[in-house]
Amino acid sequence: MSKENIFPDRDQFVSRREKENVIKQKGLVIWFTGLSGSGKSTLATGLEKRLNSEGFLTEVLDGDKVRNGLNNNLGFSSDDRIENIRRIAEVSKLFCNCGVVTISAFISPTVEIRQMAREIIENKDFFEVYVSTPIEVCEQRDIKGLYKKAREGVIKDFTGVSAPYEAPLKPNIDMNTAGKTVEECVEEIYAEVIKKVSF
Amino acid sequence: MSKENIFPDRDQFVSRREKENVIKQKGLVIWFTGLSGSGKSTLATGLEKRLNSEGFLTEVLDGDKVRNGLNNNLGFSSDDRIENIRRIAEVSKLFCNCGVVTISAFISPTVEIRQMAREIIENKDFFEVYVSTPIEVCEQRDIKGLYKKAREGVIKDFTGVSAPYEAPLKPNIDMNTAGKTVEECVEEIYAEVIKKVSF
């Protein structure tokens, strides 16, 4: 190869548009935020299944998947929580720019941390779903026994108990799961998402 | 939602197979290793363009893209170089498990660091392309003027000059770009890759 044609021309990258053309869908990041036990991961996987059944390519990023891989060297200090969300936002952006419907489900409790994610991903690609299930309901579910431990002081800085949760002011969707079936919630979200990702 | 159906069942994730079914291709990580100036990024983008033109969904990860985003908080210390490749391997794995043909182009100079990447990604999904362009040719190209600076001692620990490059012993492809056109090189690699990613 000559010197001229080995120089990596950034325009040689296949563009997002070209990728979206191949898979006939548009990239988007659907960002679920809410308390522990609010139903984020359940809705994320339910939405993914619904989208997959309609032929959409999806990627779910959630705490378990990311903490066991990319972010397995991060703890729960304030700095590490920010770095956790920063990396997730960067990876969400890569998937979105590849045309994939990306579903990220993280407590992401503060306006500031979600703003960081939104800026990394870019506003136009950031679709915010606030899972607004009341804390009483989340605590009643207490699937992993975390609220009990937080109330006992075994877990410190637990969102909603000993650390604040700041609700989004203008989410794209406000979804209170109390009294609804998973299917009903998923269908409501799907109806909005499909408008954004259809080719 | 009831307590029973909010519990996130990991089986609810859409599987790799289901994703591959949607886009009619198989995930794979094509890992380019070689000296600076060997032609890794040129071949990566050339291969991506070729695959895209045949209807494959691809993602290229290279230094510029990753250092400006996910890894923008890493430097060039020994620890940071390892962490750089670790994160890239984790992201490559996510893309591969989403069914995307993932093309990662990094010097990744040691057997050990490539072994780490291979283990994270999993051997069956790791397709290694050694870009074996001789150092004399790379240095003659010296697109970014890095070899000159390395020879002058301005850049320390430069692979091939003041830091070792350990060639892969059994790469899937050994590609010496000297005396070949980009198109010829891309076509050789494409012919092997297509066998792995076709549905």
Image (cartoon, coloured by chain):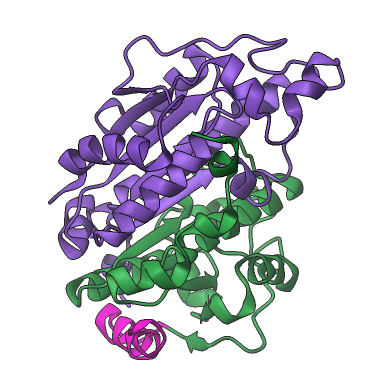
Chain colours: A green, B purple
| Residue B58 percent location from the top left of the image | 36, 54
Left or right? Give the position of A148 relative to A178. right
* Residue pictured at 73% horizontal, 22% vertical: B147
| Image position of B57 with respect to A111: above or below | above
Give the quadrant of residue B31. Answer: top left
Q: Is residue A104 visible?
A: no
Q: Nearer the viewer, residue A45 or B65?
A: B65
Is A165 magenta? The answer is no
Q: Position of residue A157 (x, y in %)?
A: 69, 54
Residue A39 in which image quadrant: bottom left
The answer to whether residue B109 is above or below residue A13 is above
- The image quarter in which residue B170 lies: top left
Q: Where residue B7 sits: x, y (%)? A: 32, 61
Q: Observer-nearest residue: B162 or A129?
A: B162
Apparent side of residue A49 relative to residue A156 in the rendered image (left or right): left
What residue is shown at x 52% (from left), y 80% (from top)? A127
Image position, residue A199 (x, y; %): 33, 84
Whether residue A150 can be seen here: yes
The foreground one among A25 and A117 is A25
In reply to whether residue A191 is colored magenta, the answer given is yes
Magenta stretch in the rendered image: A177-199
Left of A190 or right of it: where is B164?
right
Residue that protrudes farthest toward the left in the picture: B199
Q: Which residue is drawn at 31% across and 24% down?
A: B173
Which secondary structure class fits the magenta region best?
Answer: helix
